[in-house]
């Protein structure tokens, strides 16, 4: 179970977003932001952590809650390979490292990223965002 402090941080995080703080949402939020650190989780890894902590929450509830958190701007979804989704509690624009052997996502230093030009968007469109995922493989 999450500590009282972790639950309180999760509750505050939810209340600031305007989402109703259900028992399940508070438990999930405590695991995501309760220690003040940013997380990159999959629904499955979050489900395993929540279950390991003794919470009774279904995987479907984890998926639905993560979708609600995305819609509320609390987390951003980062898709790797078009099939694997990670949910990042750091919602500011920043690049990521994808560790291929571990199937793990981590933040890459934004201050070291330099993009000098982008292609022009097709007529009638605009560039909404640029996602940078740097794949890493051990040598």
Image (cartoon, helix red, strand yellow):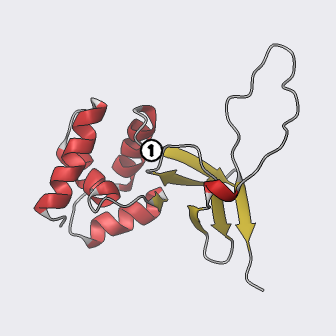
Q: Position of residue 102 (x, y in %)?
A: 61, 76
Density class for disc 1 (Cα within 10 Å; few <14, some 14-19, many ≥20) is many
Left or right of 80? Residue 3 is left
Q: Residue furthest front?
A: 111
Q: In the displayed structure, would residue 102 be above or below residue 77? A: below
Measuring 45% from the left and 62% from the top, which residue is drawn there?
44
Q: Residue furthest bottom?
A: 139
Question: Label 1 belongs to which residue?
Answer: 75
Q: Position of residue 139 (x, y in %)?
A: 78, 86
Q: In which quarter of the image is the N terminus?
A: bottom left
Label 1: which secondary element: loop
Left or right of 113? Residue 38 is left
Q: Which residue lies furthest to the top in this view?
A: 124
Left or right of 36? Residue 103 is right
Q: In the displayed structure, would residue 15 be above or below residue 59? A: above
Q: In the displayed structure, would residue 16 be above or below residue 110? A: above
Query: Is 7 or 51 nearer to us in this picture?
Result: 7
Measuring 24% from the left and 50% from the top, which residue is drawn there?
10
Left or right of 52? Residue 42 is right
Determine which quarter of the picture holds residue 49: bottom left
Determine which quarter of the picture holds residue 99: bottom right
Q: Where is residue 90 in the image (x, y as percent from the top left)?
A: 47, 50
Query: Is 4 or 84 nearer to us in this picture?
Result: 4
Measuring 42% from the left and 48% from the top, which residue is drawn there?
63
Query: Is 94 or 68 nearer to us in this picture?
Result: 94
Q: How many numbered discs?
A: 1
Measuring 67% from the left and 35% from the top, which residue is drawn there?
129
Q: Position of residue 124 (x, y in %)?
A: 81, 13
């Amino acid at each position: 179970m999450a500590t009282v402090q972790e639950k309180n941080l999760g509750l505050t995080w939810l209340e600031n977003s305007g989402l109703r703080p259900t028992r399940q949402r508070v438990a999930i939020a405590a695991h995501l932001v309760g220690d003040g650190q940013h997380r990159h989780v999959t629904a499955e890894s979050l489900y395993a952590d929540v279950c390991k902590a003794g919470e009774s929450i279904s995987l479907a509830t984890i998926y639905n809650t993560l979708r609600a958190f995305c819609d509320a701007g609390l987390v951003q979804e980062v898709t790797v390979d078009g099939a694997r989704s990670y949910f990042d509690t750091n919602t500011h624009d920043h690049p990521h490292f994808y560790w291929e052997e571990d199937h793990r996502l981590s933040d890459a230093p934004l201050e070291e990223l330099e993009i000098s030009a982008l292609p022009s968007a097709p007529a009638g469109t605009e560039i909404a965002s640029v996602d940078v995922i740097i794949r890493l493989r051990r040598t």
